[in-house]
Amino acid sequence: MPFRIVPAGVSEASREKNPRRLVILLALRKARAVARKHPEALVLGADTIVVSRGRILGKPADLEESTRMMDDLNGRWHRVYTGVALVRHRPRRSWAEAAVSRVKARKLPAEQLRRFAGRHMDKAGGYAVQDHKDPFVERIEGSRDNVVGLPLDAVRRLLKRACADAA
């Protein structure tokens, strides 16, 4: 399926504290913003967060925050939530869901953590499982695609729903 990547340019700020609702809200916000500019297109939006010990971790703002996140996740299980949304502006329709995976971070010494901190400032939790030089993730339970940031099974389900609704 041909596609274009169009940055939404919207705020990711929210007071929502429920991780599942938060990622769906942000995915819909992004998809709706792009759909307004491309009203005939079917737009896919996504957003990913990491939740560790009840705290929501987004993208680190700076090296200090990246270091804190990596230290917090070090050797611990956490959850990765990704919301995906399909939106059509004309006619106005939307479909959304969230995927959740459990991730176990490998216990790394402080020196190695400091070397990795700051490498993935554009990723929730400050790490990237798809980077083969990043040994931070030890184990994934659930969708690996979700941890990378786009749960393909969820996208397929949304596309099927959108096609069924259009029929």
Image (cartoon, rainbow, N blue to C red):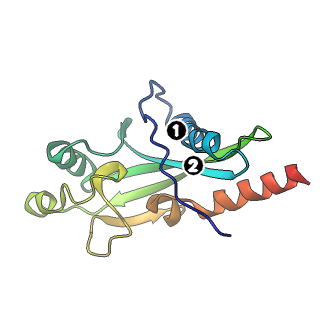
Q: Is mark 1 on a helix, strand or loop?
A: helix
Q: Residue visible at 29% across and 53% down?
A: 126
The answer to whether residue 70 is above or below residue 89 is: below
Q: Name the side, left or right, on which 79 lies relative to 161.
A: left
Instruction: Looking at this view, name the residue that lies furthest to the right.
Output: 167
Instruction: Looking at this view, name the residue that lies furthest to the bottom.
Output: 132
Residue at the spot of label 1: 26
Is the N terminus in the top left, top right, bottom left or bottom right quadrant? Answer: bottom right
Task: Evaluate whether residue 97 shows in this view.
Answer: yes
Is the C terminus in the top left, top right, bottom left or bottom right quadrant? Answer: bottom right
Q: Which labelled disc corresponds to residue 45?
A: 2
Residue type (three-letter) at the residue carrying disc 2: Gly
- Mark found first going from the N terminus, 2 or 1: 1
Q: How crowded is mark 2: few (under 14 residues within 10 Å), some or many (20 or more)?
A: many
The answer to whether residue 132 is above or below residue 50 is: below
Q: How crowded is mark 1: few (under 14 residues within 10 Å), some or many (20 or more)?
A: many
In the figure, residue 163 lies in which quadrant? Answer: bottom right
Instruction: Looking at this view, name the residue that lies furthest to the left.
Output: 111
Could you say where residue 68 lies in the image, as x and y percent from the top left?
Answer: 19, 44
Residue type (three-letter) at the residue carrying disc 1: Leu
Q: Residue visible at 32% across and 53% down?
A: 122
Could you say where residue 112 lies in the image, as x and y percent from the top left?
Answer: 12, 64
For the residues labelled 2 and 1, say whether their Cβ atoms are less than 8 Å apart: yes
